[in-house]
């Protein structure tokens, strides 16, 4: 038997969630094949390139380069601070 409480416990919420599988690599591969060899139905035609898609791809490439540069700068700074700290703090390890 439970003790009476001041707060009511709410029942768990249930959702009707159906998971979906998305293979990004497969999608990219299909786009490349479609771009270079034509559509799957056999017709050969150039896909109209969207300015938005091109801009998004360019922006993503730039952001990847910026994140790599930021990571390299942070690592150099951390190594420099560790080197300075070890030089000025006289710790005998052995």
Image (cartoon, grey):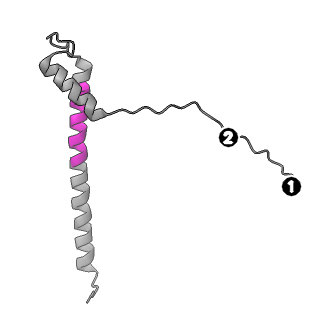
> Residue 55's mark?
none
Disc 2, disc 1: CB below 8 Å? Answer: no
Q: Is residue 43 above or below residue 59?
A: above
Q: CA distance from mark 2 to mark 1?
A: 21 Å
Residue 17 lies in what quarter of the image? top right
**Residue 50 rendering spot, x and y as whole percentages:** 23, 16
Q: Which residue is mark 1?
A: 1
Give the percent coordinates (x, y) of residue 4.
87, 52
Mark 2 Cα shell of 10 Å, populated few (<14), some (14-19), many (≥20): few
Q: From which residue to which does the magenta span run?
A: 55-68
SS for callout 2: loop
Q: Residues within 10 Å of mark 1 (few under 14, many from 20)?
A: few
Q: Is residue 44 left or right of residue 1?
A: left
Name the chief secondary structure element in magenta. helix
Q: Residue at x 32, y 34 (%)?
A: 23
Q: Nearer the viewer, residue 35 or 42?
A: 42
- Find disc 2 in the rendering and name its residue: 12
Residue under the point 25% across and 49% down: 70
Residue placed most toward the observer, 4 or 7: 4
Q: Is residue 25 left or right of residue 19?
A: left
Q: Is residue 42 placed above or below 2 in the rendered structure?
A: above
Find out whether residue 89 is within the magenta segment: no
Q: Residue 94, percent across and down?
A: 25, 90
**Is 50 situated above or below 1?**
above
Helix, strand or loop for disc 1: loop
Name the residue located 22 percent from the left edge and 72 percent from the top edge: 83
């Amino acid at each position: 038997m439970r003790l009476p409480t001041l707060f009511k416990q709410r029942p768990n919420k249930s959702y009707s969630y159906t998971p979906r599988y998305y293979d990004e690599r497969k999608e990219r591969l299909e786009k490349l094949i479609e771009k270079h060899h034509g559509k799957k139905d056999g017709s050969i035609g150039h896909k109209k390139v969207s300015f938005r898609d091109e801009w998004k791809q360019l922006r993503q490439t730039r952001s990847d380069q910026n994140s790599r540069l930021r990571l390299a700068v942070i690592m150099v700074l951390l190594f420099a601070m560790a080197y300075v700290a070890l030089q000025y703090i006289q710790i005998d390890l052995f």
